[in-house]
Amino acid sequence: MIFRSHLLSMILYAGFVAIVLAFLRRDEKKSRLKYGLVMFAIMAGGAVLFGWLMYLFTL
């Protein structure tokens, strides 16, 4: 599956990684959900931040 948007691909990847990490790291359902959401937010936010930093080098 190929997307035209790299951001969409990175967010989808972040979602899959967050789900796997949540199941590997936490035992309770509530803590899994919280950990997965935090990891997704960190990875998706990092992707956006890194994209903006790369954009500054193209100016």
Image (spheres, rainbow, N blue to C red):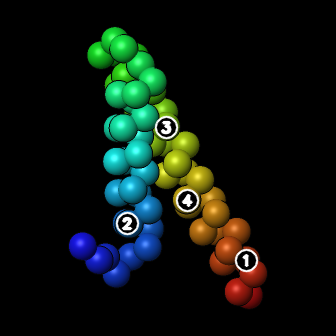
Instruction: Point out residue 26 in the picture as x, y percentages from the top left corner.
Output: 41, 19
The Cα atoms of the two marked residues, 1 and 4, are separated by: 14 Å
User: Furthest-bottom residue in view?
Assistant: 59
Q: Residues within 10 Å of mark 4 (few under 14, many from 20)?
A: some
The Cα atoms of the two marked residues, 2 and 4, are separated by: 10 Å
Left or right: where does residue 5 sit relative to residue 53?
A: left
Q: Is residue 39 above or below residue 16?
A: above
Question: Between disc 2 and disc 4, whose residue precedes?
Answer: 2
The residue singled out by tag 3 in the image is 39
Q: Secondary structure at mark 1?
A: helix
The residue singled out by tag 4 in the image is 47
Question: Between disc 1 and disc 3, whose residue precedes?
Answer: 3
Residue found 52% across the figure and 48% down from its top: 43
Q: How many marks?
A: 4
Tell me which amino acid carries mark 1: Leu
The Cα atoms of the two marked residues, 3 and 2, are separated by: 17 Å
